[in-house]
Amino acid sequence: MASQQIKKYTYDVFLSHNSEDKPAVETLAARLEDEEGLRPFLDKWHLIPGEPWQEELEKAINESATCAVFLGPSGLGSWENEEMRDALDQRVRNKSFRVLPVLLPEADPKDDITLPRFLRRLVWVDFRNGLDDNEAFRRLIAGIQGEPPGRILPYTTANGSKESKNTVVISGEGKRYACLIGTNEYENESAFPSIAYPETNIEALTHLLEDRRIGDFDQVVTLKSKEKYTDIIREIKRLTGQLKRDDLLLIYFAGYAVLDEELTGNIHLITKETDPELLSSSAIPLPSVKTFIAKSAAIQKILILDCQYRNNPAALKGQLTSNAEGIYLISNSPEFDDGFVPARKIPSVP
């Protein structure tokens, strides 16, 4: 139900905040986009200089599935107060629209200035322990997606003993999953000329992986030219989320990779619809893919980037590694001296 709702809107969440809290809100916005593949509206990122900003903010609220109202020690800003009331009014008219009060560090929920009366009856998200509070971040994601957060369960072995996430247990009974992504043609031909090999490689690799004598994979998902970048992100998230401890995951991407040097500083994987001027809102953030893989329960994970890189190799190299346990990241680039990117070796596949 949540996924159907998200598809109706341009943004997953409108981030309403006091200008004094902008650095903290921008930090969380970057995590929502990079780690979860969500589409937050942040005025600093989306308002066009020279355009009437009030009308654009009203339009953005109407095009958002939810509204997060951030509350810091200074309370609501004057325009944030207007945004909050507009969001609450929309919630009255549209029961599926959610308003999420979010407490930032040093906020006081007992203070009427910090947490207005109209927000008190709503369940809030509490970052007072710090912006790196993963439990608060998990609850924020649940609120945006309209899902109950549930509880965090420790990993328990078959004999009942509890283990840390770093413990490796392989039974040999896991399944093998693959997600193959690539496109030959792009809407912006001047920035991204057509490439001959991605979709051909995907078809050949699919044949090998599905062959019971060779790959013996249980499921191979192929995402090619017709797929939107948001659908690709959601499919990666869905696939990684269903993995079990003993499963094996292979993600393969063929095509262009570009470093967003102006805004996020992250590598983005290019899809057919990518706008080179708006990478953060039209391409696949590599940190999101790496985070989905790292958070999955499986301990055998391979990420292959068969890319043409469009930036200075030295600037890219730092992101083409993975320190997460059990992940083997391979990237091709003839401009790198070492060829393959060093990474941790995965446990042997049964």
Image (cartoon, rainbow, N blue to C red):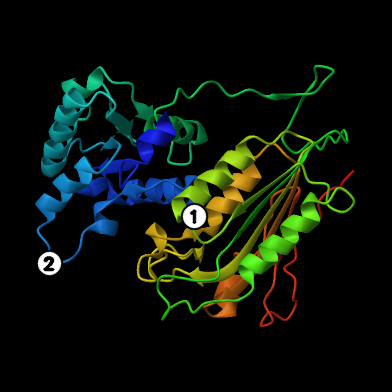
- Residue at 18% x, 37% y is 76
Q: State the residue in front, 211 or 335.
A: 211
Task: Classify residue 216 as left or right of residue 164.
Answer: right
Dot in front, 2 or 1: 1
Query: Crowdedness of circle 2 by 10 Å Cα count: few (<14), some, many (20+)?
Result: few
Query: Is 52 above or below relative to 175?
Result: below
Q: Secondary structure at mark 2?
A: loop
Residue 192: % across, % down: 47, 76
Query: Is 348 above or below relative to 116?
Result: below
Quarter of the picture holding the N terminus: top left
For label 1, the residue is 227
Pointer 2 or 1: first along the chain = 2
Q: State the residue in front, 293 or 164.
A: 293
Q: State the residue in front, 216 or 191.
A: 216
- Residue at 33% x, 25% y is 124
Residue 25: % across, % down: 33, 46
For label 2, the residue is 50
